[in-house]
Image (cartoon, helix red, strand yellow):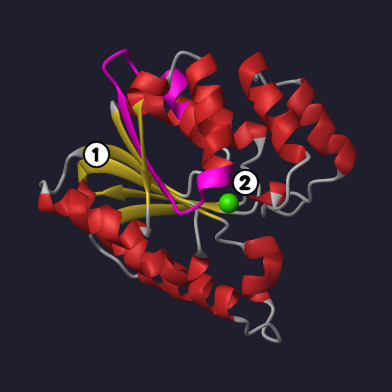
Amino acid sequence: MSKRSLTMTDDLYAYMLENSLREPPILAELRAETAGMPRSGMQIAPEQGQFMALLVELTDAARYLEVGTFTGYSALAVALALPDHGEVVTCDVDPETTAVAQRYWARAGMAKKIDLRLGPAVDTLDALLGDGAGRFDFAFIDADKENYVAYYERAVELVRPGGLIALDNVLWSGRVADPANNDTDTEALRAVNRRVHADDRVSVAMLPLADGLTLARKR
Ligand code: CA
């Protein structure tokens, strides 16, 4: 029997969700609304949201930084798991998708925890760094792939020692392993994967969860 991760069939995926998913109704509703929108595939999978909420519990995180808000699923999944004094800073450039996000955050009673920063995320992260390094417990990078290295480098500064950085889409539907595929986004993901792997500032694991999720803990 192979020791590598198994192939996820439709039946097995359904079984996994039936036997583990505890998606809050507000998140299920947000997922249903997002499914009818353009680029709905950018939303994280529900089991990934649940995993990130578990990471919050495991690490006692209170301050969460996110690059790539979209319709707000991951920010809400994390906000619901944060303590009452918890804080989310989430970055995006799209006022339309984030309007959906803000509607759900308000309905869930989480708007007070979530600070949406509209604008190029590199600028937002640089501004946050200007306020001081090491102030976040957990950072999630899930935005334009060309800037992943730039986001990662800033995230390493913005999380505290012992803090966690998660990078989404690192397996990119398998395209990262296809030598015939050299498009800009695929090359950008290969570059950040090489960077994180070689970075001795962090401990690292790459998980074949959803579209590939790297976890890096700052030493
Ligand atoms: Ca993603």
Visible in this render: residue 158?
Answer: yes
Find the distance from the CA under tag 2 to the CA under tag 1: 24 Å
Residue 155 is left or right of residue 140, and the answer is left
Q: At 73% from the left edge and 54% from the top edge, which residue is drawn? A: 2
Q: Amino acid at mark 1?
A: Phe
| Residue 70 visible at all | no
Where on the picture, by quarter, is residue 59?
A: top left
The residue labelled by disc 2 is 209
For residue 144, above or below residue 186: above
The residue located at (74%, 20%) in the rendering is: 19
Residue furthest toward the right? 11
Q: Is residue 87 magenta?
A: yes
Is label 2 in contact with label 1 (beta carbons under 8 Å)?
A: no
The residue drawn where x is 66% and y is 39% is: 45
Task: Give the secondary structure at mark 1.
Answer: strand
Question: Which label sits on residue 136?
Answer: 1
Q: Secondary structure at mark 2?
A: loop
Q: Is 2 drawn above or below residue 209 in the view shown?
A: below
* Front in this rendered view, residue 79 or 172: 79
Q: Which residues are magenta?
A: 77-96
Q: Which mark is residue 152?
A: none
Q: Amino acid at mark 2?
A: Leu
Q: Earlier in the sequence, mark 2 or mark 1?
A: 1
Where's residue 217, x and y in %?
A: 31, 47
Q: Residue at x 78, y 40 (%)?
A: 36
Residue in front for this viewpoint, 6 or 34? 34
Between residues 2 and 130, which one lies in front from this camera angle?
130
Give neighbour class at mark 1: few <14, some 14-19, many 20+ (Cα, 10 Å). Answer: many
Is the CB of the residue bearing disc 2 within 8 angstroms of ligand 1? no
For label 2, count other residues whose C-alpha is less than 10 Å away and answer few (under 14), some (14-19) or many (20+): some
Does residue 17 show up magenta in the picture?
no
Q: Nearer the viewer, mark 2 or mark 1?
A: 1
